[in-house]
Image (cartoon, grey):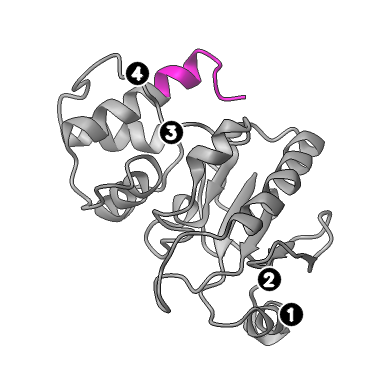
Amino acid sequence: MLVIHYTEMEDKGFAIERLCDPEAKVSAHYLIGEQGEVVRLVPEEKRAWHAGVSYWRGHKDVNSASIGIELDHPGHRYGYREFNDAQFEALVPLVARIVKEYDIPRANVVGHSDVAPARKIDPGELFPWDRLAEYGLCLPRPEKLERGDPFDNDAAFYLALERFGYDITDGRKAVEAFQRRWRPEKINGEIDGEVRAILFQLLLDRDRGHTR
């Protein structure tokens, strides 16, 4: 897996200091500055503490099966805004090399909020997943929805959401995380017809083998 985060700190230096502090018990394999500078903090073959308590597609210890990339960014706490182009342009080749080297499927290139929906919201609704998908490095948002409202009730939706990969222990937070990634223009934690249709299409595409 590959997990994308933001630092949610005001200064890159402070972020690096914290990520390298054993007492903080948080680390990541890479940090990318806003001007595109890439800093390797942990060797890829080593386990980093970037995901924390997390879950994705049956994996309850995401740290042991993933590479974490932190993006220097103020986050929602210090003034959430769009990500810098230079930073994104540095991210693309790094992700491309990692997914190729470790044979990571597009479905397993995720955000921190995807693997820890009850605790985290990064990299947030402004992260350009669509641009990353144009390079074939993550799943795109489905453009064609084959069925308008495929689930009979909310329980069926939650089961499907878990099948796709999310931890549904906190149902509303799981829905918010799904919306943040797949329908960022409206994040309210409520299950509606559009959200159900998007999830169903993602599952259809995966069953058809379109997630590599």
Tell me, yes or no, whether the two marked residues, 4 and 2, touch with CB atoms within 8 Å: no
**Does the magenta-highlighted stretch encompass residue 17?**
no
Front: mark 2 or 3: 2
Q: Residues within 10 Å of mark 1 (few under 14, many from 20)?
A: some
| Label located before the other in sequence (3 or 4) | 4
Q: Which residue range is magenta in the image?
A: 203-212
The tag on residue 27 is: 2
For image coordinates 37% across by 23% down, the residue present is 143
User: Which mark, by number, is residue 20?
Assistant: 1
Write the residue at 41% across / 65% down. 119
Q: Are marks 2 and 1 in contact (CB under 8 Å)?
A: yes
Q: Secondary structure at mark 3?
A: helix
Q: Which residue is mark 4?
A: 144
C-alpha distance separating marks 4 and 2: 39 Å
Q: Amino acid at mark 1?
A: Cys
Q: Are marks 1 and 3 in contact (CB under 8 Å)?
A: no
- Which dot, 1 or 3, sits closer to the camera? 1
State left or right for residue 189 relative to residue 113.
left
Q: Earlier in the sequence, mark 4 or mark 1?
A: 1
The mark that comes first in sequence, 2 or 3, is 2
**Label 2 residue SS:** loop
Judging from the image, what secondary structure is the residue with disc 4 in?
loop
What is the distance, in whole Å, between disc 1 and disc 3 at their CAs? 33 Å
Going by the numbered disc 3, the residue's amino acid type is: Phe
Which element type, helix, strand or loop, lies under badge 1? loop
Disc 3 to disc 4, C-alpha distance = 18 Å
Residue 72 is at least partly visible in this image: yes
